[in-house]
Image (cartoon, helix red, strand yellow):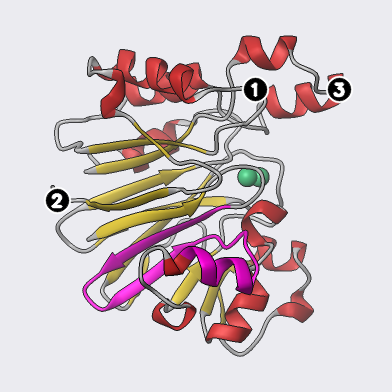
């Protein structure tokens, strides 16, 4: 099983996971043209993707989902709340409703959704498995719940939200209401919260940690790396960064 990001951040998200002959995207925050351009960096086309899992209805996650699904023939999997928040009339014959607690499979990939606290209707995140490895993905969560810790325990790879540095957010130029939303319990994880989550997990099998959904205004790769590496006791440059423009290239969950 391997995974790559096409881009990560408040201007668009898409994470690709591949096992055997199956390729699934988590979120599609880019329209068909931009999606095609970003997939081409991995030598793939839209038709090489089988399905898209949608975490929640915010535009940076769902913005390209329905247009890409129609264009490329993707199955769309999302919770009832997410579908209705993004208008049910956009559903098509390949739209499937998932339960936020119930595992399902797409081809060779097993997928365990789990609910997260975020200011959306029914947001979820996912743990993906090919039967051998586990990739845990978490973005867009305002705080860490015991259930999230249980779900992300014992993964081989983690893609973890490091949205902001609390001090940079407090001193930055966002209006007060936006600062409260982003830093609040239904907003986004800061570097310290992501590091604290990492410190609660069984990391014996962990081979990859990638900081994701970094704010371009209120964070820096250096600060995210410093927080996560301190929690693991590893060198900062071992922590990967998913960037807005590039995402990151293929990583093999077993290597
Ligand atoms: Zn987001
Ligand atoms: Zn969001």
* Label 3 – label 2 distance at C-alpha: 43 Å
Task: Name the element at disc 3.
Answer: loop
> How far from the left and from the top, in percent, is residue 58?
70, 52
Pointer 1 residue: 218
Q: Earlier in the sequence, mark 3 or mark 2?
A: 3
Using the rendered view, name the quadrant where residue 226 is placed: top left
Q: Earlier in the sequence, mark 2 or mark 1?
A: 1
* 221 vs 242: above or below: above
Query: Dot 3: within a 10 Å radius of its alpha carbon, few (fewer than 14), some, or many (20 or more) residues?
Result: few
Disc 1 or disc 3, which is closer to the eye? 1
Say how many tags the image has.
3
Pointer 3 residue: 175
Pointer 2 residue: 254
* 150 vs 68: above or below: above
Determine if the magenta segment contains residue 112. Answer: no
Determine if the magenta segment contains residue 26. Answer: yes
Tell me the magenta residue range: 13-38
* Label 1 – label 3 distance at C-alpha: 13 Å
The structure residue drawn at horizontal position 45% and vertical position 83%, both measured from the top left corner, is 47
The structure residue drawn at horizontal position 54% and vertical position 38%, both measured from the top left corner, is 213
Task: Name the element at disc 2.
Answer: loop
The N terminus, quarter of image:
bottom left
* Label 2 – label 1 distance at C-alpha: 33 Å
Question: Which one is in front, 3 or 155?
Answer: 3
The structure residue drawn at horizontal position 46% and vertical position 56%, both measured from the top left corner, is 101
* 210 vs 47: above or below: above
> How far from the left and from the top, in percent, is residue 146?
43, 31
The structure residue drawn at horizontal position 47% and vertical position 17%, both measured from the top left corner, is 223
* 15 vs 181: above or below: below
Dot label at residue 32: none
Would the CB of label 3 be found within 8 Å of ligand 2?
A: no
């Amino acid at each position: 099983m391997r995974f790559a990001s096409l881009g990560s951040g408040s201007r668009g998200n898409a994470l690709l996971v591949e096992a055997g002959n199956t390729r699934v995207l988590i979120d599609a925050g880019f329209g068909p043209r931009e999606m095609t351009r970003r997939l081409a960096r991995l030598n793939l086309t839209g038709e090489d993707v089988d399905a898209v899992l949608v975490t929640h209805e915010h535009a940076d996650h769902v913005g390209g989902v329905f247009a890409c699904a129609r264009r490329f023939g993707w199955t769309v999997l999302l919770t009832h709340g997410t579908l209705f928040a993004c208008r049910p009339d956009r559903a098509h014959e390949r739209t499937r409703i998932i339960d936020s607690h119930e595992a399902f499979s797409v081809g060779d990939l097993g997928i365990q959704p789990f609910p997260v606290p975020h200011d959306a209707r029914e947001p979820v995140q996912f743990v993906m498995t090919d039967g051998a490895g586990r990739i845990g993905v978490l973005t867009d969560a305002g705080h860490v719940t015991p259930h999230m810790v249980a779900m992300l325990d014992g993964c081989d790879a983690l893609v973890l939200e490091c949205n902001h540095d609390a001090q940079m957010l407090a001193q930055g130029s966002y209006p007060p209401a936006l600062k409260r939303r982003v830093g609040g319990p239904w907003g986004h994880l800061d570097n310290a919260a992501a590091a604290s989550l990492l410190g609660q997990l069984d990391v014996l099998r962990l081979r990859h940690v990638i900081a994701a959904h970094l704010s371009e205004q209120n964070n820096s790769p250096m600060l995210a790396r410093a927080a996560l590496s301190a929690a693991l006791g590893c060198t900062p440059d071992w922590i990967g960064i998913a960037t807005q423009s590039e995402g990151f290239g293929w990583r093999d969950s077993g290597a």
